[in-house]
Amino acid sequence: MVERVLNMKFNDAAEGEFNFAVKDIKAELKDSDIKLAMESIVAKDIFLSKGGRLESIAEAQIVTKETTHVVL
């Protein structure tokens, strides 16, 4: 089983960080799609962190984890 998680990091109004993760993303997801989605999240003011509103995008990572079950 292969699990793909998109980790997104944003900068907030208090110069802190806000992290958000989405599980089970599509394999064909492009960098440009991720950037557009993150910019949309900031523009539409969807999330509020402890440090206030999100001000800008910081970085994103796709983490892939493969699990192999062992038959005992």
Image (cartoon, helix red, strand yellow):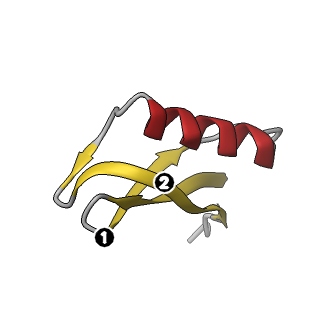
Q: Residues within 10 Å of mark 2 (few under 14, many from 20)?
A: some
Quadrant for residue 28, please give it: top right
The answer to whether 43 appears left or right of 17 in the picture is right
Rendered position, 24 above or below 45: below
Q: Quadrant of the C terminus?
A: bottom right
Mark 1 crowd level (few <14, some 14–19, many ≥20, 10 Å Cα): some
Residue at (29, 58) in percent of width and height: 13
Residue depicted at 66% across the width and 37% down the height: 36
The residue type indicated by label 1 comes to Gly
Please, which residue is most extreme toward the left here?
A: 50
Q: Which residue is mark 1?
A: 16
Residue 3 image offset from top left, x and y in percent = 62, 53
Q: Nearer the viewer, residue 43 or 9?
A: 43
Real-space Cα separation, disc 1 to disc 2, in angstroms: 11 Å
The numbered disc on residue 64 is none
Q: Are marks 1 and 2 in contact (CB under 8 Å)?
A: no
Expressed as whole percent of the image width and height from the top left, the position of residue 18 reads 35, 60
Secondary structure beneath dot 1 equals loop
Q: Nearer the viewer, residue 6 or 59?
A: 59
Decide: is 41 above or below 60.
Answer: above
Q: Residue at x 16, y 58 (%)?
A: 50
Is residue 8 left or right of 16 when viewed as pictured? right
- Mark 1 or mark 2: name the one nearer the start of the chain: 1
Q: Left of 2 or right of it: where is 50? A: left
Who's the residue at 40% across and 52% down the image? 55
Q: Compared with residue 67, is residue 5 higher up or lower down, i.e. above or below?
A: above
* Count of marks overlaid on the render: 2
Residue 56: mark in rendering:
2
Residue in front for this viewpoint, 33 or 13: 13
SS assignment at label 2: strand
Q: Position of residue 4 (x, y in %)?
A: 64, 52
Q: Position of residue 64 (x, y in %)?
A: 68, 62
